[in-house]
Each structure stands twice: as C-alpha cells, then as structure tokens.
Amino acid sequence: MKFSLTDKENKMKPMRIFLVMVLAITILGASTCAKNNDDDGGDDADLPNFIQESCSGCSQETVLSNGFRFISYVKNIGGSGKIGMTISSSKGSATKEFAVTANTSYVFSADVPAQAKGSASFTYMAKFPGKAGFTDARTKNGFDCTGAPANMVLNKR
C-alpha cells in the first residue's frame, strides 16, 4: 500500500512543522524564564543577611582564665530563618545553629582557649551569613590557641 500526499497537503506539511517548532520554543522559553528568575530559587531579601553593627564603648573581647571570649556586634538586615555558625581552630571546631529574626541586632560570642606564648599568634574568625556577610577576624599575638572554640552564644541586643 502506498500513501501519497496531495499538493495541498505537501504545502501544509512545512507550515505544520513550523507551527510546532514555534510552539515548542515558546513553551521552552516560558519555562526557562520562570526557572531562571533567581539563582537560588528564593528571594534573597527573605534570607538572613548580616552586617557589622557598631557598639560604642562595648567590649570586643573578654580575658578568661584559660583564653578569650570574642564578641561581635551584628545586625540581620535580611529575613528571619536559621543560620549555622562554625568557629574553627587548629585544635578543633564548634558548630551551632541559631534562629534569627528579620531586622534585628545581635551580640555573638565564642570562647577560644589560649595560653601566653611569646612567639605565637592565632587568628579568631567568625563569618556571618548573607549577601553582605560580615567576617569578624582578629589576630592575638603572644598567645597560642590550645583547644577547640566553645560556648557559642547569639543573643538579641
């Protein structure tokens, strides 16, 4: 059995293919635009986003019997959510999750065990999440880190 197309059907075949291609490209383009509206699938304004906040006269660190308590003053200019904080040293690390509220100021502190040692130094670093993201880094000369950080606390100011 042999099928043959009429002249009219032969002329319509390319038009149908063209319309199907235009429809496919339109559908593909619409779905691509919807997916690529944002690179992480969410609104960055809804994510926690920390900046440094000044605190005139406030202590930046406290000397402990076995080291230091480092203190950071920050503000969440983003949305509410949960953040994970990790403080590491050559002797170990500490990780803790905190629930944070939008547009709120906080005091963060972490204890780092250390001992006096004339030729040594170590750097404390706390990185706060977000697009702005603030990193509080301080070097302590004349001291050697002797253990993992501990006692991480994040309190509203």
Image (cartoon, rainbow, N blue to C red):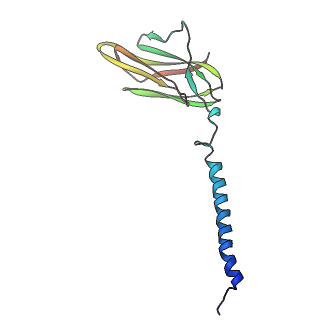
Viewer-proximal residue, 12 or 146? 12
- Residue shown at 34%/14% (left/top)? 141
- Of all residues, the one furthest to the top in this rendering is 57
- Of all residues, the one furthest to the left in this rendering is 119
Q: Position of residue 100 (x, y in %)?
A: 62, 26
141 left or right, relative to 156: left
Q: Position of residue 47 (x, y in %)?
A: 62, 33
102 left or right, relative to 70: right
- Residue shown at 54%/29% (left/top)? 129
Q: Quadrant of residue 51?
A: top right
Q: Quadrant of residue 73?
A: top right
- Residue shown at 39%/22% (left/top)? 147
Viewer-proximal residue, 151 or 31? 31
On screen, residue 31 above or below 78: below
- Give the quadrant of the C terminus: top right
Viewer-proximal residue, 39 or 107? 39
On screen, residue 123 above or below 20: above
Q: Position of residue 22 (x, y in %)?
A: 66, 63
- Residue shown at 67%/81% (left/top)? 10
Q: Position of residue 54 (x, y in %)?
A: 55, 13
Q: Quadrant of residue 145?
A: top left
- Give the quadrant of the N terminus: bottom right
97 left or right, relative to 5: left
Labels in figure, total:
0
